[in-house]
Image (cartoon, coloured by chain):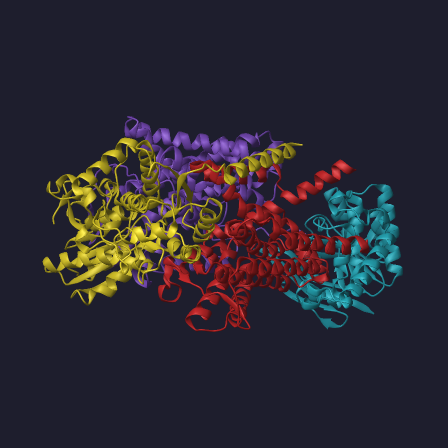
Chain colours: A red, B cyan, C purple, D yellow
Amino acid sequence: MKGATVASRYGGVFVLAVIVAVLPWFLPNSFYFDVVINSGIAAIVCVGLNLLIGYAGQISLGHAGFFALGAYSSAILTDNLGWPPIVSLGSGLLVVALLAFAIARPILRLKGHYLAMATLGMGIIISIVLNQEVDLTGGPDGMPVSSFSLLGQEVDSELGWYWIVGGSLIITVWLALNLIDSAVGRALRAVHGSEVAAQVAGVDTTRYKILIFVVSAVLAAYAGSLFAHYTGFLTPSEGSFFRSIEFVTMVVLGGMASVFGSVIGAAILTALPQFLTVFHDYEHVMFGLVMMLTMIFMPKGLLPSLRNWINKRTS
Amino acid sequence: MSLLEITGLSKSFGGVQAVQELEYTVESGKIHSIIGPNGAGKTTLFNMVTGIFKPSSGEVHFNGQDVTGLPVHELAALGISRSFQNLQVFFNMTVLENVMVGRHLHCRREFLQSLLHTPAITRSDEGARHRAAELLEWVGLKAYVGDHADSLPYGALKRMEIARALACEPKLLLLDEPAAGLNNKETQEINELIQQISERGITVVLVEHDMRLVMGVSDHILVMDHGKKLAEGTAAEVRENPDVVAAYLGRGD
Amino acid sequence: MSSELLQFLLSGITVGAIYALVGLGFSIIYNASHVINFAQGEFVMIGGMGTVFIASAGAPFPIAMIGAVLLAVVIGISLQKLAIERARHASVVTIIIITIGASIFLRGLAGVIWNRDFHSLPAFSGEQPIHVAGAVIVPQSLWILGVTVAVAVALFVFFNRTMIGKAMLGTAHNPFAAKLVGINTNNILILSFALAAALGAIGGILIAPMAPTHYQVGIMLGLKGFSAAIVGGLGSGPGAMVGGLLVGIAEALAAGYISSNYKDVVAFVIILLVLFFMPSGLFGSRASERV
Amino acid sequence: MNFVRYICTLIAGAALALCSFIGIAVADTIKIGSFLAVTGPASFLGDPEKKTLELYVDKINEQGGINGKQVELTLYDTGLDAKEAVTFVKRLISEDQVDIIVGGTTTGETMAVLKEIEKAGIPFISLAGASVIIDPPKKWVFKTPHTDAMAVGMVYNDMKKEGISKIGLIAGAGGFDKSCMKNAQALAEGAGISIAIAETYGKGDNDMTPQLTKIKNAGVDATLFCGFGGPSSIVTKNYAQLGIEGPLYHTHGSCSKGFIKGAGDAANGVRLPCAALLVADQLPDDDPQKTIGMDYIKAYTDKYGSDVSTFGGHAYDALFIAVEALTKAGTTDKAKVRDAIEATENFIGVDGIFNMSESDHMGLSLDSFKMLEVENGNWKYLY
């Protein structure tokens, strides 16, 4: 029993680390690097979001709001106030953590579709503010962000960003797996399974829901901050309702309550539009179709469906 | 010594009195049962004792402490646990993990340490895993330990819920219709299990419709009707109580 | 009442009536299947764009309108049969993603098959504004309000006076019991998607003379309709109506008195506040969990 | 297993897609890359731009290409997502290895890709409005549309002529609208105009009566509308319904026939600055833009059957500036092509006459705008 969980925990992380380490030799140019880096950034958001949606069973249709807040905090503090990027990043995470903590209690009292509405509203409010505060954010035309530097060392190569994002993703996945396989993680999954039974077992469900909401928001903000410095330019579409839906789709597509599923879901959905360009005008039609068909035939998501199938084959 | 003391407890839902002015005492170490027709307020009473419902009025004392209206998880920490009439299983987890959730309060659960999975967390988890496996074996579910909860038969889930409740190491265990939906043999096994639980020094309160089970195991029986106490006493006393006879026979229940 | 306030209210009620129609669609489908159909907004688009393109093929407007509603109904039924029904055992979030996929699909198709321009319909009965106590209202607003009220009354009669309507409500409350008494719950599902699609399309046709229609109009109207249904309480018809009017009026008053920059923020804050104090919306059932 | 078959189909599809996007390198073509917001909130701008590029690249190839080489257009739809725009530009540069990029429907997308463009050193002609794109001039970056500031300046000149001094502003929430509003506020003082009230509406709004009621009650001489698409018609209708005094001005965002069709009779009397294209038939015969405008209108409506807007015109000008530069440079050497673009002189486009220089990477002057008024449901050329 013990051996199995530890092996699956670290085995997966090891495989991920090997893939991350080897991949750069197979990426021919900056376009491929860009897709992979964007996948990695999305994957960090999705691993956090999966803790909230897949494990704790609390839906959020507003996480792009946190992503954008992290991104814009970094941009504004670094470029408008001249703070060192790493300090801006830390401050951004703190701001998002406090905000998420403040709204978590009333929002997480809601359930199901009502929670979906409330988080959606929250995301839209953030996105409108980013759009309207032109003096601070540049409004819809966006704002430039200077590159990331640490100890006087500037990161501006694609390979540099690849290692930062890849490393961050490995650590995020490792931390998430650790958390899930602990009393805290079991408590979270219990909240999903039956809130009242979890309480009877002594789980302070409100506290854990708030905790995981804040954790997922902070991860989104961290990814947002990386994105801001990596791409060098921000527009409010990073915080839009569509982006939130995209994150949730990645989580569900990869597989709810599957950390590696989230990584796969993020990679697939980031790369998919690049493949679909062959359909020209029908690109979006195909995108919608792929979304629908995947979820109809694999309602549990790619990775769990694949695992089920392999289990059935082998047994 | 009384473990649980309920005084003047009432609960109403939008004008409907589910429980009215109830006085009830649970003695430490004994097996208690609560019987009564559907809608008598038995489960509502459980829900108030475990903190799921806030009482409209009245008080609940546990172990000499006023616990009226405390949140569920705090009552759990004080030593009150329960099973559910309609199963409340964590279907997204394995059987072992279900019971491990019951060990929540006995596990180390510092957030940062959990993130890093420090050796302290690993040790505490090992302890919980060991204890949960033990309890599953004790309730007779050894064969199912590694299975997913959604693959278990109904009767096994009922036992798993009891194992989960026991994992909390409660002083008071409330069992809501543990024999509902079980066949004779299974009911007999539950009967034995309840007696074994009691032998471990855990006070048990049982809500049950199966009269043979109730009459067989109970040291004390409370009869409820329309949210009120109709009668209480030993099995023999209750059986001969004219009000009880009238209520049951009159309704042909 | 100042004429200014009256003007804001008239605007809010008109727009709110459209939100209410879309919201009703959400509620009807939710009742029948506990599914939130995020493609609801696309029915609005199909109503408006469908009318435009059927009319441009030479059909008179009334025929084009009926044609567009029928088109929406057919698509609604296909959505139910081809997508929702096949995924009925999937989780809530999975079904949400499926309906979002459907909306991207339909929107994409409309953009290619029709086009990506803005199109208008002529107002049903002229554009001469009517003056009321210092405020103005256009005849199309009266059409919108009139049709919305008529739809509300028709739905009330349908759900409370006809067998099939009662069967739909019964299925919403207890699908198992409904099956037992011989109701074909599958037909009920089809009917509710058809009804919701028709309501959306009617909303889309009504608003097109006021605000040009476009292959993407469904996005925002769908969102606002969802807000309306949630604020009113999911599954409640009167709730969706009140919710729609509330969102519409909140937007208009916020634009008029607070800040037009932040009018949508004000509307969403009101929605959030309603939910914080009434977690199941204004008219939602507050069923507590049975344990 | 249903989903196994499904996965196989997916993989097959992906492989197919991969093959075509790695692409069979066709030797000796000139590759023009483009990224446009064909779908999404700015599809009103991006869609005619795409149609124009496809139409004229075909025409150029029919006529023998550039310097005897065929032209290959690689066009991606960003859906108005700056992140996608950056990825597509990287793809155009490093994967498709295009020789020049024409595109960027909005200011946001354009600004997002500048870092990449400058790093790679590839000539780029943007189709977006804001002056920040070329001010200060960046080595590789050019643009064709008039700036929002020019449109506002034109409107203010006309207002002064009409004796208007106190105005109301109404704008949407998009980038075009915000930029226009910002310029209107910044230029007002210098033009001797006071803005009494500034209102905005949100995405997908269907009724702007509340905002216009406030403008009405502010007692302004005229109102300036900053926006495009459906709202152009809604605002105009609401304005007429409320019976607001004074003329309504639009900017170049409403320069499409769809606006007049949507607003109906309410459009009559609206004044706006547009490119000469819309009134090509009314221009005096000696106007150099007359033929080119008429030709573009004919080609576009023949092919697509829909009315032209001036947005497609931006793409037309950008494409032909690129073609002229490629022709003159006689090579696809990026630096030489860039120099040729910068040397564009007296280029007659539908947007106006372009004269670029080291300090001016747009090359249009204020007089390239024409002032129009809507009369009897049609454009009327004023001056």
Up the image or down, D15 lies above or below B2; here it is above
Q: Nearer the viewer, residue C126 or A98?
A: A98
Question: In this rendering, would B33 be left or right of A74?
Answer: right
Q: Is residue B184 visible?
A: yes
**Horizontally, is C128 left or right of C118 in the view?**
left
Front residue of A33 and D150: A33
Q: Quadrant of residue D360?
A: bottom left
Q: Nearer the viewer, residue D64 or A149?
A: D64
Q: Is residue C234 left or right of residue D51?
A: right
Q: Position of residue D116 (x, y in %)?
A: 44, 56
Q: Up-down: is A19 above or below A172?
A: above
Res C154 visible = no
Residue B93: where, in percent of width, then height? 72, 51
- Residue at image position (25%, 53%) is D146
x, y percent for residue A34: 52, 52
* Residue at point 27%, 61% (across, down): D359
Of residues A165 and C3, the one nearer the viewer is A165
The part of the image, by quadrant, that contains residue C263 is: bottom left
Q: Is residue D170 above or below residue A279?
A: below
